[in-house]
Image (cartoon, rainbow, N blue to C red):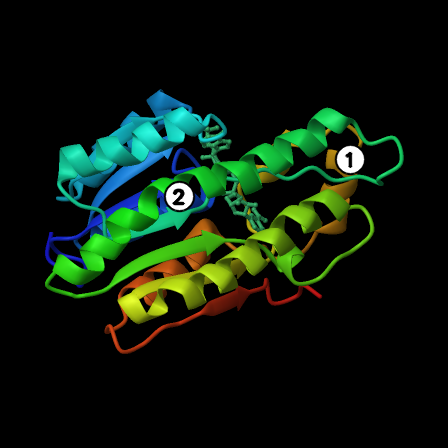
Amino acid sequence: MAGRLQDTVALVTGASSGIGEATARALAAEGAAVAVLGRRRERLEKLADKVRAEGGTAIVVAADITDQRQAAAAVESVVSELGRLDTVVNNAGTMGVGPVVDSPLEEWERMVEINVRGLLYVTHAAVPHLLRAAEDSPRKVADLVNISSTAGRVARPGTAVYNLTKFGVNGFTEALRQEVMQKRVRVSLVEPGTVETELSSHLRDGVREAVERQVQGMELLQPQDIADAVSYIVTRDRRVAVNEILVRASEQT
Ligand code: NDP
């Protein structure tokens, strides 16, 4: 498939639904060979079939990124199957909501495991390949895009630990950006507002209904809106580094 990412390879984590799925399709539409990562293999196979039906190249990487060995092996398998790694979108994540007092600890642990540790494991394994791609590739640039959230910029009651993880992602992203920018690995942040995905379906009973009430009547963002932001970042000429994009739903505070 011809496009601005032709002859490049992209890895998208959390590609079995929502923002990750839309992003993988968007990058494939720009010509990238995409590796789609998640735990639900069947969903990933369906996505890979769609990409191929649209003329693109896709491979499935079934892995749980909270397991460091699986995360590292996943990155290596992309490089050995597709030959290189030019773009990584750290998108896999989860959200728990509710006051700190009486929150189930398992929910906090899950957020820290996926949103922080998982992102770190994938990044640790991927950065050496991105550095190599920035040097070797015809485009002479590579990209790491971290999907944070408005919750990475604004803290509110009821999202304390989600805020902790996403503020953490923002700080990590900015520090890493400065470490590798001279080597033309661009490290960027995308901060979505409320997007219509499966994210809220994982909330606890009671909490989920309250969150749904909060956004009732609001026209929510669609996964494609965030995929567009990622695609914009990674298709820029190497002289341009779009460090950060915050995308809110129009009616969202
Ligand atoms: P979804 O629940 O639709 O997608 C989450 C993805 O993460 C799934 O593909 C899931 O795949 C994957 N995932 C979860 N745990 C793991 C794991 N341990 N290993 C590998 N993959 C995993 O939600 P969204 O698309 O909404 O979320 C994507 C990102 O966007 C998250 O980081 C989220 O915090 C962020 N975001 C979302 C917003 C929204 O309103 N929806 C707003 C702001 C930010 P599988 O289950 O197959 O492993």
> How far is disc 1 from disc 2 in space, using C-alphas?
34 Å
Of all residues, the one furthest to the right in this rendering is: 101
Local SS, label 1: helix
Can residue 63 be seen at all in this image of the molecule? no
Image quadrant of residue 37?
top left
- In this image, 203 relative to 147: left or right? right
What residue sits 49% from the left and 36% below the top?
Answer: 118
Q: What amino acid type should be assigned to the residue bearing mark 1?
A: Val
Image quarter for residue 187?
A: bottom left
Q: Note whether 49 is above or below 2 in the view shown.
A: above
Quarter placement of the C terminus: bottom right
Name the spot of residue 214 as percent of width and height, x first: 76, 50
Does 18 sit above or below residue 144?
above
Q: Which mark is residue 124?
A: 2
Mark sitting on residue 57: none
Q: What is the number of the mark on residue 207?
A: 1
Neighbours of disc 1 within 10 Å: few (<14), some (14-19), many (20+): some
Seen from this angle, which residue lies furthest bottom? 239
Is the residue marked 2 within 8 Å of ligand 1, measured from its CB?
no
Residue 76 image offset from top left, x and y in percent: 25, 34
Query: Residue sitting at 45 percent across and 31 percent down?
Result: 65
Q: Nearer the viewer, residue 248 or 90?
A: 90
Q: Position of residue 60 (x, y in %)?
A: 27, 29
Left or right? Give the position of 247 relative to 76: right
* Of the two numbered discs 1 and 2 in the rendering, the one whose residue sits closer to the viewer: 2
Q: Amino acid at mark 2?
A: His
Mark closer to the chain start, 1 or 2: 2
Q: Residue drawn at (53%, 64%), measured in percent from left and top?
A: 247
**Residue 21 percent coordinates (x, y):** 38, 41
In this view of the protein, can residue 148 be seen by the observer?
A: yes
